[in-house]
Image: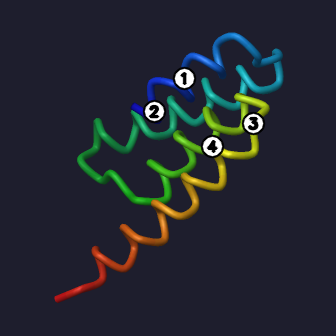
């Protein structure tokens, strides 16, 4: 639900600079996927490029909280 809303707002509000960041982050993450080396950092960079393009501080804040929570989950044995 949040990802869809963020993507919609980003599409409506982004400028060329934001679009360039989204395209670059998508290409970098896509390269990781193609190599089978997906990283949390690449995933975060891609999603962060989208939420930053929304122009709404709520989305980056929530993404940051989710990233912290998932980081703790991933570090458990």
State the CA–CA distance, disc 2 to disc 1.
6 Å
Q: Upstream in the sequence, badge 3 or badge 2?
A: 2
Residue at the spot 36% in from the left edge and 80% down from the top edge: 72
Q: Nearer the viewer, residue 47 or 27?
A: 47
Q: Position of residue 54 (x, y in %)?
A: 71, 29
Q: Upstream in the sequence, badge 3 or badge 1?
A: 1
Judge the density around disc 3: few (<14), some (14-19), many (≥20) Cα neighbours within 10 Å.
Answer: some
Residue at the spot 71% in from the left edge and 38% down from the top edge: 52
User: Which of the numbered marks, if any, corresponds to residue 19?
Assistant: none
State the CA–CA distance, disc 4 to disc 3.
6 Å
Q: Relative to 56, is 7 on the left or the right?
A: left
Residue named by callout 1: 7
State the CA–CA distance, disc 3 to disc 1.
12 Å
User: Which of the numbered marks, if any, corresponds to residue 3?
Assistant: 2
Residue at the spot 63% in from the left edge and 43% down from the top edge: 59
State the CA–CA distance, disc 4 to disc 2.
9 Å
State the CA–CA distance, disc 3 to disc 2.
13 Å
Residue 69 in which image quadrant: bottom left
Residue named by callout 3: 56
Secondary element at tag 1: helix
Q: Relative to 61, is 37 on the left or the right?
A: left
Q: Quadrant of the N terminus?
A: top left
Indicate the colouring scheme. rainbow
Mark 3 or 1, which is nearer the eye?
3
* Mark 3 touches mark 2? (CB < 8 Å): no
* Mark 3 touches mark 1? (CB < 8 Å): no
* Mark 4 touches mark 3? (CB < 8 Å): yes
Q: Upstream in the sequence, badge 1 or badge 4?
A: 1
* Mark 2 touches mark 1? (CB < 8 Å): yes
Q: Position of residue 40 (x, y in %)?
A: 41, 59
Q: Which residue lies furthest to the left in this view?
A: 77
């Amino acid at each position: 639900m949040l990802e869809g809303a963020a993507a919609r707002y980003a599409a409506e509000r982004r400028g060329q600079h934001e679009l360039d960041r989204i395209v670059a982050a998508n290409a970098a993450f896509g390269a990781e996927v193609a190599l089978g080396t997906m990283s949390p950092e690449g995933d975060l960079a891609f999603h962060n490029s989208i939420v930053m393009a929304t122009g709404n501080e709520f989305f980056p804040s929530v993404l940051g909280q989710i990233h912290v929570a998932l980081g703790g989950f991933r570090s458990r044995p």
